């Protein structure tokens, strides 16, 4: 079904993180747009929706990908952007260890240059292995890397925690990465 919640949510990820211009949407420097503009541009693009549907998408999205401002007049994606926006997150001290789910075909390159943000604005890390496994599975057979987050902090590196509890950092150089025993 073209206009079911999942379809709307995926399309919202696309326009709020990657291609706002696809429907002529304006995002401010912090990634916000007005809820009203999002709804009208979605409708103009053939995605029939209204405030109550968007509210339901924000509330029920499996990864809490979107947030409203307090008055729900503005909306943005919590993380995962490829366009250049400033989320204005405050640095947060991470747990000693974080995890990154990837897949075996990327390992050779990761071991050369460390984890790089690729098309996104940050490297994404998880506090638990289950989440990392799910993230890695999107690319192929998952490989879970252990990241020495505490050591990175000791060396002056900064971490952020997105609204939906994804850990974000600029890059993870090779010396902070531990491979699983079988790789
Ligand atoms: C890999 C989803 C070669 C990296 C998830 C990953 C996450 C390298 C891929 C969020 C590399 C990038 C982000 C290097 C990193 N050489 N490959 N030096 N450094 N890579 O999708 O972390 O559903 O941009 O291991 O839940 O997989 O969109 O990043 O495999 O939170 O909300 O390059 O996306 O959230 O892939 O996933 P991605 P990711 P959403």
Image (tube, rainbow, N blue to C red):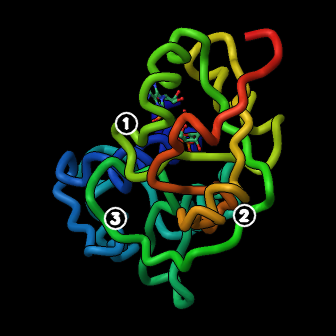
Q: Looking at mark 3, is its residue's CB closer than 8 Å to ligand 1?
A: no
Residue 74 against residue 55 in the figure, above or below = below
Residue 171 against residue 182 in the figure, above or below = below
Which residue is the site of mark 3? 38
Q: Which of pointers 3 and 2 lies earlier in the amino acid sequence? A: 3
Percent position of residue 113, x then y: 42, 30
Residue 96: image quadrant is bottom right
Disc nearest the viewer among 1 and 2:
2
Q: Residue furthest bottom?
A: 71
Q: Is residue 16 left or right of residue 160?
A: left
Percent position of residue 176, x then y: 63, 42
Q: Which of pointers 1 and 2 lies earlier in the amino acid sequence? A: 2
Disc nearest the viewer among 3 and 1:
1
Q: Which of pointers 3 and 1 lies earlier in the amino acid sequence? A: 3
Q: CA distance from mark 3 to mark 1?
A: 27 Å
Whether residue 58 appears in this view of the structure is: yes
For label 1, count other residues whose C-alpha is less than 10 Å away and answer few (under 14), some (14-19) or many (20+): few
Q: Is residue 167 left or right of residue 108?
A: right
Q: CA distance from mark 1 to mark 2?
A: 22 Å
Q: Looking at mark 1, is its residue's CB closer than 8 Å to ligand 1?
A: yes
Which residue is the site of mark 2? 94
Residue at point 50% right, 70% down?
Answer: 51
Residue at point 52% right, 23% down?
Answer: 111
Residue 118: assigned label: 1
């Amino acid at each position: 079904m073209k206009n079911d919640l999942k379809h709307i949510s995926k399309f919202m990820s696309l326009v709020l993180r990657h291609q706002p211009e696809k429907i002529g949407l304006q995002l401010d420097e912090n990634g916000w747009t007005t809820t009203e503009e999002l709804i009208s541009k979605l409708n103009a693009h053939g995605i029939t929706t209204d405030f109550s549907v968007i509210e339901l998408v924000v509330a029920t999205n499996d990864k809490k990908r979107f947030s409203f401002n307090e008055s729900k007049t503005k909306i943005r994606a919590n993380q995962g952007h490829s366009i250049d926006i400033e989320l204005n997150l405050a640095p947060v001290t991470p747990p000693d260890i974080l995890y990154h789910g990837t897949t075996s075909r990327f390992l050779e390159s990761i071991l050369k240059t460390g984890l790089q943000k690729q098309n996104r604005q940050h490297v994404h890390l998880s506090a638990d292995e289950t989440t990392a496994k799910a993230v890695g599975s999107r690319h192929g057979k998952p490989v879970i890397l252990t990241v020495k987050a505490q050591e990175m902090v000791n060396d002056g590196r900064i971490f952020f925690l997105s609204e939906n509890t994804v850990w974000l950092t600029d890059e993870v150089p090779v010396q902070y990465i531990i491979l699983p025993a079988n790789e």
